[in-house]
Image (cartoon, rainbow, N blue to C red):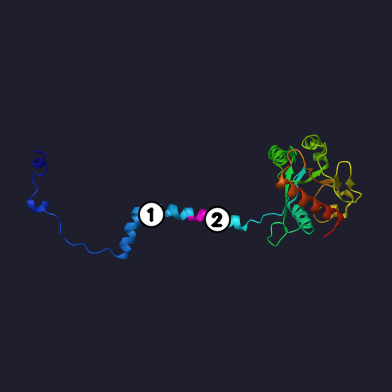
Amino acid sequence: MAREMALAGVSKEELQPDNTLQEPLTPKQKWQNFWYYYRWWVLAAVALVIILFICTWQMLSTVKPDYFVVMVTKDVMDENSLSGLEDEFAEYGKDINGDNKVVVRIENLSLAQYVGGTRNALAETNAQKLMAYLMAADSMFFIFDDACYNDYLGKLKESAENGVFFDKLNVKDAGYNEQECYWNWTNDERSSSFYGMDMPKDLYFGIRYMGGTASGSSAQEKHDTCKELLERFVTKTK
């Protein structure tokens, strides 16, 4: 009964299937039909390919440094001065990772709470990064200005088994402190060169002593290569 009611007023001819042959779609119509139903899938796939390409390009184009140095200062150092010092260090380094170039990267951690009367929002973050580097032994080469070395000396000594943060250097130089095992460049002409003009007159260079959290084959390798670099830098041995 329900079927008869639904088909009321519909002729038998209207109920017959349409056997009219449809013309094949043109390439343009096929593309339009495909794009209508699948455009969001296509756009998502294209976006994914672009992201993968960018990530791969960044990985391949990023230069991995042969040496990593942490410079801890009260004030923020000028980028040009840091680049100049990196280039100077590279003159005494070796191609450790085999990419036919010597690259030294210096990360400057400024710890001043206020810079130019404005609160330095990065100071606390940089202090935490310094502690993280010490705990993870990510860096063996450190440079401190006078203020930061004195402020953090107690904490640094706690991380060393013998109460001395820096390891002994095999150098003969007036700037070398045999008790604390750091080299101060204050009397070296390079402290007033083109890249040193914006840097503190007193900078303490040293290699972290192997002990405490600084242990393991990876840390030992970093220690040895950085120690050799600093000794070559101090003695100007290329």
In the rendered view, tell whether residue 172 sits above or below residue 30: above
Q: Is residue 71 visible?
A: yes
Q: Nearer the viewer, residue 51 or 177?
A: 177
Of all residues, the one furthest to the front in this rendering is 217
Residue 7 coordinates in the image, percent (x, y): 10, 44
Whether residues under marks 2 and 1 lie with C-beta atoms below 8 angstroms apart, the answer is no
Q: Is residue 69 visible?
A: no
Residue 32 coordinates in the image, percent (x, y): 33, 59
Q: Quadrant of the N terminus?
A: top left
Q: Which residues are magenta?
A: 49-54
Label 2 Cα crowd, 10 Å radius (few <14 / some 14-19 / many 20+): few
Residue 84 coordinates in the image, percent (x, y): 77, 56
Q: Nearer the viewer, residue 56 or 25?
A: 56
Q: Under tag 2, what secondary structure? A: helix
Count of numbered tags: 2
Which residue is painted at 12% across and 42% down in the image? 6
Residue highlighted by disc 2: 54
Q: Report the amino acid beneath label 1.
A: Arg
Residue highlighted by disc 1: 39
Residue 50 coordinates in the image, percent (x, y): 50, 56
Label 1 Cα crowd, 10 Å radius (few <14 / some 14-19 / many 20+): few
